Amino acid sequence: MSQYWSPAVRRLTPYVPGEQPRERVIKLNTNENPYPPAPGVGKALREYATDHLRLYPDPSSTALREALAKTLQVESSQVFVGNGSDEVLAFAFQAFFCHGAPLDVPAITYSFYPVYANLYGVELRKHPLNAHWEVDIEALAASTERSGVIFANPNAPTGHAHSLETIEALLKRVTDRVVLVDEAYVDFGAESAVALVDRYPNLLVTGTFSKSRSLAGLRLGYAVGSEELIDGLLRVKDSFNSYPVDSLASVVGIAALNDPEHFEACREYVITTRERTRQRLEALGFEVLPSKANFVLAQHPNYEGAQLFAGLRERGILVRHFNTSALNNFLRITIGTDDEMDSLIEALEAICG
């Protein structure tokens, strides 16, 4: 540890992103979309006037927020945008969860939540998943003296998604603090809670362009909620960085939103391939958790997760292995193209043969 670090930095345990290999491999470890962005994205990049780069972007990202509002069928005043959904989540922790009371969160979920909690001094109250590896909504609702509630829907890395009815039941019971629903993977078969924001002023829904819009390399995220919540996020943003979304990213994001046909086609490809992959994994003896995301979480009763991970790595296929007690035997497998998933199954047949 550096002698120059502050005590707060010394206490941090940073988030560890999925490996980004330099060599050519079949990359099924970071939940990227296997298909390219909408054709209009390329056109927007080619036609972008580089002279615009000498100017600061619109600090309010008005055009992008209006395009998102149209897509999500809300008002632009209900939309916040940032440099990836991770930044939006970080702002939300600062804006809503620093109350000196525990934040209710699933015990197994997106691993950036504990990082933010540690960074901002927020105590986490972790609730185990239920017997079906689902987020225990009843446990989240039953707690008291809280700073808020946060969970991913679909959950990461398990893939299960709760219905809109179940989420609304939670909101009817938790009315005094913010309920944040992280919808990074919602477009792959789940129901979005955005439909509830007009009825529940404490509901904040976050999303990203990284997954279903194939723009992970661009870094665009957003939040949808009441104007009161959006104003809270803006106060944090403008105390940290008034220009988190650059002008090029805004143009490209709008181009992606303006091609709903491409969006629908790509998400359907992923969903179809996910179900085909699940069936083939189960035929090999794997237990595959039900998923509404662009990945599956699977384990084999006869092989350790680390063993399977290493065997796939040797064959040029990269998946995600979590070295934790709860998930040590599981592999999280991103859904790629049909050809990539064929290669995965062939490799697993050789390993488990």
Image (tube, rainbow, N blue to C red):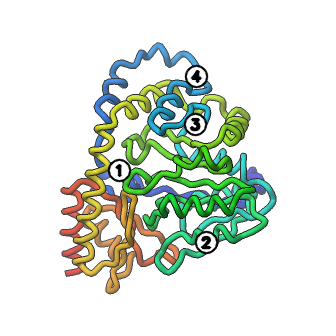
Q: Residues within 10 Å of mark 2 (few under 14, many from 20)?
A: some
Which label's residue is closer to the chain start, 2 or 4?
4
Which mark, residue 79?
Answer: 3
Dot 4 falls on a residue whose secondary structure is: loop
Question: Is tag 1's residue or tag 2's residue first in the polypeptide sequence?
Answer: 1
Q: Give me the disc on residue 138.
A: 2
Give, as a three-letter code, the residue at label 2. Answer: Glu
**Is residue 3 at least partly visible in the picture?**
no
Inter-mark Cα distance, 1 to 3? 37 Å
Mark sitting earlier along the chain (2/3): 3
- Reading the chain from its start, which is encountered first: label 4 or label 3? 4
Label 4 belongs to which residue? 58
296 with respect to 158 (left or right): left
Marks 2 and 3: which is nearer the front? 2
- Residue type marked 1: Arg
Residue position for label 1: 22
Residue furthest toward the bottom? 302
Which of the 4 image quarters holds residue 272?
Answer: bottom left
Q: Nearer the viewer, mark 1 or mark 3?
A: 3
Residue 157: give x, y in percent of width and height. 46, 65
